Image (cartoon, rainbow, N blue to C red):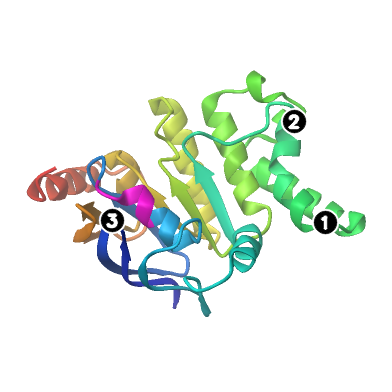
Amino acid sequence: MNILEVRDIKKADILQGISFDVKEGEMVAIMGPSGSGKSTLLYNVSGMDKPDCGKVMLGDTEMVHLSEDEKADIRLNRIGFVFQQMNVLQTLNIFENIMLPVKHAIKNKNERKEYEKRAKLYMKDLKIEDLAERKVSEVSGGQLQRACICRSLVMNPEIIFADEPTGALNQRSTEEVMEAFLDVNRKGTSILLVTHDSRVASRCDRILYILDGELKGELALGKWEKEDASREKRVAGWLEDLGW
C-alpha cells in the first residue's frame, strides 16, 4: 500500500511534471545534481510548499488543495522532518528540543507525559538517552542529528521527509545517522530523503534520479541488510550511466 502518491506535479520552471509513489515502510532516496529540483520536490510533496499543479496524496488525504492551517496540522501530527541545518533552539537542552512538537500539539499535561515516555524510548533506541540534559553546543553533529530524528518521530508520523540529513556531517557521523534512519525504517516508518551521497542512497530501498526537474531514472535495491560493497558499486555504476 502506498503512503505517498505523487502525480504530475509542476512548480514554476523547476519541476516539470514528476510522478512517483512511496510504499508503507519504504525508504526512498532522491538524487541528482545541484539545482536539479530535489529539495523543491521534497518541499512540494510534504506540504511545505504548494505545486502549481498536480496531485499529492498522503494516505487518503489530498494535500495540494488544503488550507495552510490544514497543512500545518498535518505537518505537525502526521509528518516528520529532518533537515541538513538541524533546526534547533540553542536555549533549550536536547530533550526539550525533541519535545517541541509535543509542546505545540498536546496541551494536556497528563497526555504529554505519555509522549515524554515515547521520546525517551526513541532516545534510548538511537543511543542518545544520556544526552537529555546537554546543551546543543555540547554534543556532536551526529548526536544532534539523531536528536532531530527523535524529534521527527515523537508525534508518531506516517512518513519522515529528510533534506540532505547527512550533508553537514563527517563520515563517522553520517554512518551513525544512517544507522538511526535504518533502525527507524525497520520499525515501519516510511522515509523520503534527498541526498548527494551515493553511500547514503545505497542504504535505501529505492533511488529516484532527478535532472532539470524531471524524473530521469529509478533504481530498486531492496532492503539493506549489511555492509555490501557490490551494492554501492551498483549505485555508482547506475549514476555513471545516467551521466552523473
Tell me if I can see residue 91 in this picture.
yes
Tell me if I can see residue 224 in this picture.
no
Residue 228 coordinates in the image, percent (x, y): 28, 44
Q: Residue furthest right?
A: 110
Could you give the CA–CA distance between mark 2 and mark 1, rounded to whole angstroms?
20 Å
Q: What's the amino acid at mark 1?
A: Glu
Q: Earlier in the sequence, mark 1 or mark 3?
A: 1
Q: Give the quarter of the figure containing the C terminus.
A: top left
Could you give the CA–CA distance between mark 1 and mark 3, rounded to whole angstroms?
36 Å
Q: Which residue is mark 1?
A: 114
Residue at horizontal 85 percent and vertical 57 percent from the top:
107
Q: Nearer the viewer, mark 2 or mark 1?
A: 2
Q: Local crowd at mark 2 within 10 Å, few (<14), some, or many (≥20)?
A: some
Q: Decide whether the magenta segment is chiefly helix, strand or loop.
A: helix
Q: Looking at the image, do the residues carrying marks 1 and 3 touch, with CB atoms under 8 Å apart?
A: no
Q: Is residue 63 above or below residue 91?
A: below
* Magenta stretch contains residue 221: no
As rendered, which of 150 and 50 lies closer to the eye? 50
Residue 211 coordinates in the image, percent (x, y): 19, 52
Residue at horizontal 44 percent and vertical 78 percent from the top:
1
Residue 120 coordinates in the image, percent (x, y): 74, 44
Residue at horizontal 9 percent and vertical 45 percent from the top:
243
Q: Which residue is mark 2?
A: 92
As rendered, which of 48 and 125 lies closer to the eye? 48
Q: Which residues are magenta?
A: 36-41
Q: What's the amino acid at mark 3?
A: Ile
Q: Earlier in the sequence, mark 2 or mark 1?
A: 2
* Magenta stretch contains residue 38: yes
88 left or right, relative to 42:
right
